[in-house]
Image (cartoon, rainbow, N blue to C red):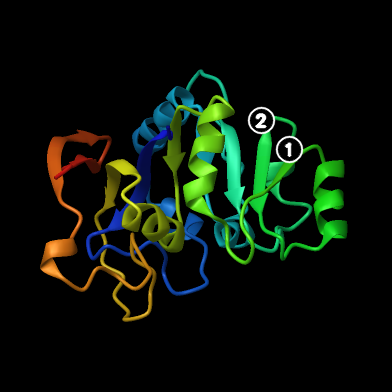
Amino acid sequence: MRPYIIIVSEVTVDGKLTLYRGASSKELMTLMDQEAYRYLHEIRAKVDGIMVGCETVRTDNPSLTVRYVEGKNPIRVIPCSTANVPLDANIFSKDAPTIIVTTLRAPEERIQRIRELGAEVWVVGEDLVDFDKLMPLLYERGIKSLMVEGGASINWELIKRGYVDEIRLIHLPVVVGGENVPTLVGGEGFKSLKNLLHLRLRAHFRRGHHLITEWEVVRS
């Protein structure tokens, strides 16, 4: 068993997540109006868990809590192979439980410091986080639904394993350009028509000034 997984992201018209590689996505998110933020937080309030990669934590320092609507905060899940998340990151606030998922590569003293901050630390994998082992553990922990807010590398890891059930996009009406700017999904890519992830458009509508599209993954 595994959680039901929904990737949720803001994207530009040309599919970019940031202004340039290494930039915070929060810069582009300043283009979102209140209704778009409410949509994002409505999803957070309905899921059991929320996941971002440790690079997103380092770059964006998100809180991953529910603020624009009423509702419970999801459990924060951060895969990080060496547990090198900043110890002053917002994810260590007491607003919601936090699970740092790491590997045998993580220094024991680092794991101990994170636990002292009140977060759980799970060692799942040797060199890289083993998502195949992680998913049933999350389900057992009570995370039956998981919202994934990036970044591009995490999105690819989950998509290539066939774990993603939905993709929901908040479209930003701008073009960023740039060959090396992160897009919605990173990684090596499928490189073959027969391997592509197929989606079905379930809904499209406006929230505030933004187009929202909701896609279901087509299972073969």
**What residue is at 32 percent from the left and 79 percent from the top?**
178
Give residue 93's mark: 1
Q: Is residue 174 above or below residue 139?
A: below
User: Could you say which quadrant of the image residue 91 lies in?
Assistant: top right
Q: Quadrant of the C terminus?
A: top left
In the image, 102 versus 92, the foreground residue is 102
Q: Is residue 81 above or below residue 101?
A: below
- Mark 2, Cα crowd under 10 Å, few <14 / some 14-19 / many 20+, is some
Quote the CA–CA distance across marks 1 and 2. Answer: 7 Å
Give residue 96's mark: 2
**What residue is at 12 percent from the left and 42 percent from the top?**
200
Picture coordinates of residue 41, whole percent (x, y)? 45, 31
Q: Secondary structure at mark 2?
A: loop
- Residue 23 shows up from this direction: yes
Q: Is residue 48 left or right of residue 112?
A: left
User: Could you say which quadrant of the image residue 46 lies in?
Assistant: top left
**What residue is at 41 percent from the left and 61 percent from the top?**
152
- Residue 67 shows up from this direction: no
Q: Quadrant of the N terminus?
A: top left
Picture coordinates of residue 36, whole percent (x, y)? 35, 38
Q: Is residue 15 left or right of residue 59?
A: left
- At label 1, the amino acid type is Ser
Circles 1 and 2, Cβ within 8 Å, touching? The answer is yes
Residue that lies at the very extreme toward the top in this rendered image: 70
Q: Is residue 193 above or below residue 140?
A: below
**What residue is at 67 percent from the left and 58 percent from the top?**
103
Picture coordinates of residue 43, whole percent (x, y)? 40, 30
- At label 2, the amino acid type is Ala
Q: Secondary structure at mark 1?
A: loop
Give residue 120's mark: none
- Mark 1, Cα crowd under 10 Å, few <14 / some 14-19 / many 20+, is some
